[in-house]
Image: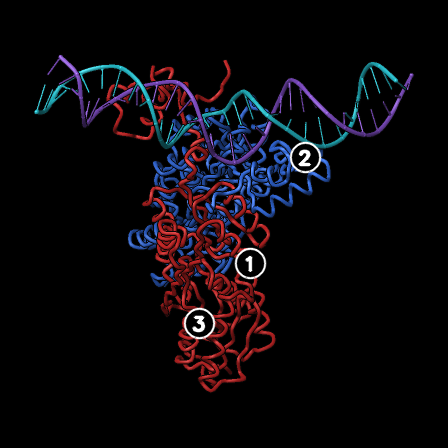
Chain colours: A red, B blue, C purple, D cyan
Amino acid sequence: MPARKPTINDVAARAGVSKSLVSLAIRGSDRVSDESRTAILRAAEELGYRPNAAARSLADRRSHTIGVLLHDLHNPIFAQVLDGVQEVVREHGYRTMLVTGDETSDREAAEIAALLEFQVEGIILISHDLDPERALRVARECPVVTVLRGDISGAGIASVCSADTEGATLATKHLLSLGHTRIAHISGGVSEVARAREVGYRQTMAESGLAGQEIVLPGDFTEAGGRRAALRVWEEHPDVTALFVANDLSALGALAATQGSGRSVPQDVSIIGYDGMSLAALGSLTLTTMVQPLEEMGRQAAGQLFAKIDSPRRRAQHVRIPSVLHPRGTTAPPPTSAERQ
Amino acid sequence: MPARKPTINDVAARAGVSKSLVSLAIRGSDRVSDESRTAILRAAEELGYRPNAAARSLADRRSHTIGVLLHDLHNPIFAQVLDGVQEVVREHGYRTMLVTGDETSDREAAEIAALLEFQVEGIILISHDLDPERALRVARECPVVTVLRGDISGAGIASVCSADTEGATLATKHLLSLGHTRIAHISGGVSEVARAREVGYRQTMAESGLAGQEIVLPGDFTEAGGRRAALRVWEEHPDVTALFVANDLSALGALAATQGSGRSVPQDVSIIGYDGMSLAALGSLTLTTMVQPLEEMGRQAAGQLFAKIDSPRRRAQHVRIPSVLHPRGTTAPPPTSAERQ
DNA sequence: CGTCCATGTTGGAGCGTTCCAACATTCTTC
DNA sequence: GAAGAATGTTGGAACGCTCCAACATGGACG
């Protein structure tokens, strides 16, 4: 007794009808008589029949699947975006195929290639590390929308991201308005998002009469990177009173390192992050940060994608969503010189 | 000019060979002459050919894919397990198909059904919420391994999980050894894992002469749940000096609520969690917790799965891995009665 | 009472691959 | 120099499904 999986033909034979009718019944067509339908569904149930998705998408030439690349599963903000994406994708009767590109750009390219081989009908990149050329090649094969990375402009790639420069400006101004002047920035590296946030910081410092006093330490958007960069700040610039960190995950690292160096937050040092990572709102010190509406961004991205799928000639849109300052427990006025003693 | 995707036949025509030879060349067979290979690969490149995974897995009757269900993307510990899983899956030349079952058991069942329709060759459940009956039905269709949930025993479902009762015992003993006696437990609900951790707590209390003094508040493994439960503790049992929380995510919630109630940690209240979530090691107060080797557990689970795939008659193994106490910043001796005043 | 229509139902072609048996061609070996 | 082995190459049959044109059947209608 071979344990071969039952096919549509087995169901047809058992129900005493043709495979075509089984196909219709399984998919819930209304042009099947009640009698046949019952017989077919019972036969399918008894045999433990399960449609073969590969055969189906081959015959159908549609996979009903959207590919989603998550840049890094360890940063929980991507999960928040994904929630929004999934919601819309399901509404449209599609399913998602998830893939992670942890770390390397080559790995991401390979995972995207896999998605394309699966004939996904669209791809959402929840952040990514692809060079524009590769991304554009992908976009020629199927609709692509990026979230949280909007740098590949001009081409057929839509994007939904935050107004990073403006957000960084607000963050810096928040620190300035509290009275800080010795403000350092821990950057996120050289990606477009990181650059935009850095620019917001630099511009605001310059416009506030602090030109030449910018301090930028390279980071990489990870907690460990934030920790390292903060340690360097306290070594090289011990008189800094405020840190604007490029993202929340790094800010948590910087927070730990700062407290580890004997400074207390926010009495001695203020720290502000960027992202709106829900876990950072938690804990003893809730991180002051620039909050992005992550789920909503996911929903919009998926919406864009389906719009593109429905009318392929449509122009790619680039949506920028403002981030909102959420002052929480890690920012306060700087210590007075008396206190600093 | 229809934008139909090029197939193996198009490549064959362009390279002037048969489709069979293209098939061989694409898959890197060594029985293709260098001359043919070069011509074929060039033709493929020029046409932008991409093998169709659906057709491939249909013809091959193998998908080379392992399905992975992530119970909840928001708890970062699952990402840590996934890292281990991916590592081994890739070593075996397979790919993973990720799926999340956020919240409901029905959704999980639906996602698993989708995996089976894709003909995945095995399934790894990184935690799950299935009732045993459903899980067993799945296991009859393809090899299944569960991680962080080992309750479906007896059947063909292998598991890799932590020794929860023993770990909970160690956690409770840690608090006892610091001098605490008024110790409350915030549970994780009624799942097997939650039960096992609760049992460890109850047994240890009883064995330490504190029978009848157990305090258990229901939680649900989420941060919000931990927060709510902690609030109830401080309302109903203000003289408690230590909390053993069923998992780290909830412990972070409980920590926030505790500090919000005006108590300081660990001076007034000690808190210990369970899991080894890397983010909880971060921040101002690093959470004392029972650490599980999450990546290693992922690797072992994938290893078990491939063992089962290679020899289907093999008995399902149930691996229990001990958790290790990591005393960090949230536990300390209880305040003396003088201090409490 | 023949015609038309609506309602169910069917077999065959096709989706893009892989596998297999069979076939050329060239290289060894005695 | 014939037999056999090694090396490349090929067309056709699957894989399990969906689509389509065509076909029964049984009323409704003039």
x and y, in percent, of residue B69 in the image: 45, 39
Identify the residue under disc 1.
A133
x and y, in percent, of residue A15 in the image: 34, 16
The one nearer the camera, B138 or B217, is B138
Q: Amino acid at mark 1?
A: Glu
Identify the residue under disc 2.
B29
Q: Secondary structure at mark 3?
A: helix
What residue is drawn where x is 64% and y is 43%? Answer: B41
Instruction: Mark 3: give few (<14), some (14-19) or many (20+) Cα within 10 Å.
Output: many
Q: Assess whether mark 2 and mark 1 are in contact (beta carbons under 8 angstroms).
A: no
Instruction: Give me the disc on residue B119.
Output: none
| Circle nearer the viewer, 3 or 1 | 1
Identify the residue under disc 3.
A165
Instruction: Determine the CA span between mark 2 and mark 3.
Output: 52 Å
Q: Secondary structure at mark 1?
A: helix
What residue is drawn where x is 57% and y is 46%? Answer: B47
The one nearer the camera, B280 or A66, is A66
x and y, in percent, of residue A166 in the image: 41, 73
Instruction: Mark 1: give few (<14), some (14-19) or many (20+) Cα within 10 Å.
Output: few
Q: Amino acid at mark 3?
A: Thr
Compare marks 3 and 1 and give the one earlier in the sequence.
Answer: 1
